[in-house]
Amino acid sequence: MKRICILGSTGSIGTQTLDIVREYSDDLKVISLSASGSVDRMEAQIREFEPKMVCMFKEDAADELRKRVADTDTKVLCGMDGLIELCEDDEVDMVVTAVVGMIGIRPTIAAIKAGKDIALANKETLVCAGHIIMPLAEKMGIKILPVDSEHSAIFQSMQGFPKKSVEKILLTASGGPFRGRKREELVDITWREALKHPNWTMGRKITIDSSTLVNKGLEVIEAKWLFGVEPDRIQVVLQPQSIIHSAVQYVDGGIIAQLGTPDMKLPIQYALFYPDRRPMKEERVDLFKLGQIIFEKPDMDTFLGLKLAYRAIDEGGSMPTVLNAANEKAVALFLDDKIHFLDIYDIIEESMNRHEKIEAPTVEQILEAEADCYEFIASKWSS
């Protein structure tokens, strides 16, 4: 029986993780859950899974939830201290980090220090703090198992082979809804158009990130830390059908890839049961129906998110934090109809240009760099 804590249990990854728990209730037990402010969803999860503890990040949500579940034995915690308490609990074997944003960094560090394996779905953890997280995980002897579909595919493709035999990582991308368009065709794009991803059903923010290719840039940064491969050996390849989730090219020229339908349940389940592979009832890839697989080179001059990410990796230090923070705020402004699609790139680039890089930032300095970036953007674009 594996005992799990799910941070972000009411979001897309969290709810799909709970689907797998339902399927394998004899092998997985939910010890704790967390959410930001979704009281209705959390109440339903408490009544179904009967966790020992839950944490609501927002204090008013925690207060409301306590009233609603007073008839249960579940303890309701609040804020960052609550998240850390969930992660340090002796009854937890694995923490699924599916929260969005910087709030995932401190709980992940706490979980690693407490000896918990990590099923990682929080991008900021490695994008902003990879230089802290990976050495700490190695020191504590814990596993960081990627839940992101591309990184899971790379991880699966590397099983049984030493890292020194890897020549190149082939990180695939669908290209998003605007693949093939040129810059002049993106001037009047609305967020409603950007949310129409051709293959994946995801949250609003990550769907916009897919349309700008910022998401793929963030994944390049994650891959660098997860697999110890320098960025010049990570090649982004457009694969519009989203059937090849990523691949690894070895020193002898051989390429090993992981294929599957565009469904997050496979990488989630693989992380939960690694190294075992368990049956799954989801749809299979029909190669005859597929017919062919298409590969294209990304247009980094139109979709600047990828180019800006490689720049952030090259400069290193606190620059990936600024890339991530600026993108987060820019996407929020775009979704609020306050800026145009192409302004996202301008905001990121201007934020990076003004930032004075910190070489090896602490968690506190990472959070300060994020706050400074937010303040700068608010002073120029939020009105």
Image (cartoon, helix red, strand yellow):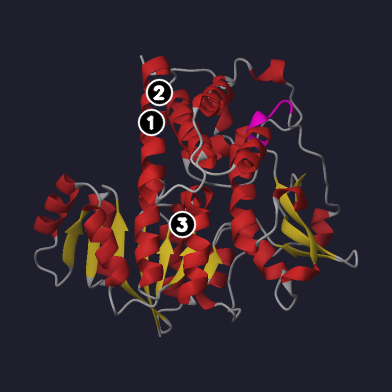
**Quadrant of res 251:** bottom right
Crowd around label 1: few <14 · some 14–19 · many ≥20 (10 Å): some
Marks 2/1 in contact by CB < 8 Å: the verdict is: yes
Say which residue appears at 61% left-offset and 32% top-offset: 212
Residue at 76%, 69% (x, y): give it: 164
Locate the N terminus and report the quarter of the image it occupies: bottom left
Image side of residue 263 versus residue 16, left or right: right
Residue that badge 2 annotates: 376
- What's under tag 1, amino acid-wise? Asp
x and y, in percent, of residue 180 in the image? 76, 30
Label 3 sits on residue: 13
Q: Are marks 3 and 1 in contact (CB under 8 Å)?
A: no
Residue 126 tag number = none
Magenta span covers which residues? Answer: 301-306
Question: Mark 2 to mark 1: distance in Å?
Answer: 6 Å
Give residue 140's position: percent from left, percent from top: 45, 75
Q: CA distance from mark 2 to mark 3?
A: 31 Å
Q: Is residue 263 above or below residue 59?
A: below
Residue corresponding to mark 1: 372
The foreground one among 69 and 303 is 303
Q: Is residue 305 magenta?
A: yes
The structure residue drawn at horizontal position 48% and vertical position 18%, both measured from the top left corner, is 339
